[in-house]
Image (cartoon, rainbow, N blue to C red):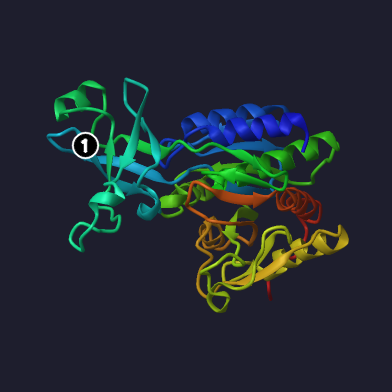
Amino acid sequence: MDKKSEKFLFEYLNNASPTGYEASGQRIWIEYLKPYIDTWKSDNYGTVYGIINPDKEFRVIIEAHADEIGWRVNYINDKGLIYVIKNGGSDHLIAPSKRVNIQTDESGIIKGVFGWPAIHTRNSKENNKHPETDNIFIDVGAGSKDEVLKMGINVGNPITFVDNLEDLNGKYYVGRALDNRMGGFCIAEVARKLYENKIDLPFGLYIVNSVQEEVGLRGAQMITETIKPNAAVITDVSHDTSTPMIDKNTYGEIECGKGPELTYAPSVHNKLLSVVLNAAKQNNIPYQRSAASRSTGTDTDVFAYSNGGVPSALISLPLRYMHTTVEMAHKDDIEHVINLIYYTLLGIHPDMELKYI
């Protein structure tokens, strides 16, 4: 990864973009993408997409989602302590002792912490409770509800953890929101690679950074009806099952550093998946296989079942410790995801037969 790419990666990943408040991250993303595309657009809820060859009738999407999990202010008590609800699939077990940013309407970012009673005081069964959504709380150093309100904090304000992206011993990137802004990084790098290699695609390419995936794939649901693609290649993250307490019998065998994960599922189109597999084999890109029973749980499901059925495939980045502040992705896997999407696009043609029968 060159210095330009890494600078963009750190700026993009370190920006807070919780579900419903993705705009600041989307601005960073599209500014990086602009030199490599012909035009760009956004929809009413903040999904942003760059377009190469906008006049071509055959339309292919490559997509990631831009939002990260977080919290929302739900209740402020008389002592000035803030109770929260989840914004996406946030993990209440990791919240105590974490620093947070509260995004206010007019006062900017207000700092706070998830407080938790000291271990010394939790000396009985009654007091030794585990973190739950209804008992974790944020302390902003205020002594009353009025003081909190004067800071500009109100019910509904979004909250994210403070942890930023770091290089971990030269092999991994670690931090919050790799799910799935690392995917947004990858598809932007694909656009850059197409531009720098002067690739003339025979179709329109839509590089899509969707919003609100973490609350039900909502951004993809909206944008697929707008673009009406002929094919879609989705990238998201998947679980590294080599870490403790994950049952391979249930979640399969996937490991960071061994290449992107390719999923077999009802929503994954077998013929489009064969294009991905051929791209991997012909370009010596390592990959791993997984199976999904009903749904992939990613935007792939939305694209596949939209517009009368859109051939869709899923290329996933193995990730350790998903939905924590120490999500880990192997640098080699990131490069392989970029290359696999790139070479997959080179194998797609408007006249290819994607119908099964």
Query: If the image is split into quadrants, where does the C terminus sit?
Result: bottom right
**304 and 350: which is toward the camera:** 304
Residue 98 locus on image (x, y percent): 40, 41
Tell me which amino acid carries mark 1. Leu
Q: Quadrant location of residue 71?
A: top left
**82 and 74: which is toward the camera:** 82
**Left or right of residue 167: residue 95:** left
Q: For the point 75% across and 30% down, which residue is it? A: 3
Q: For the point 81% across and 64% down, which residue is it? A: 278
Seen in the picture, residue 188 relative to 140 is either above or below; the reply is below
Residue 62 locus on image (x, y percent): 65, 48
**Secondary structure of residue under mark 1:** strand
Residue 279 locus on image (x, y percent): 81, 59
Q: Quadrant location of residue 155?
A: top left
**Left or right of residue 277: residue 69:** left
Circle 1 sits on which residue? 81
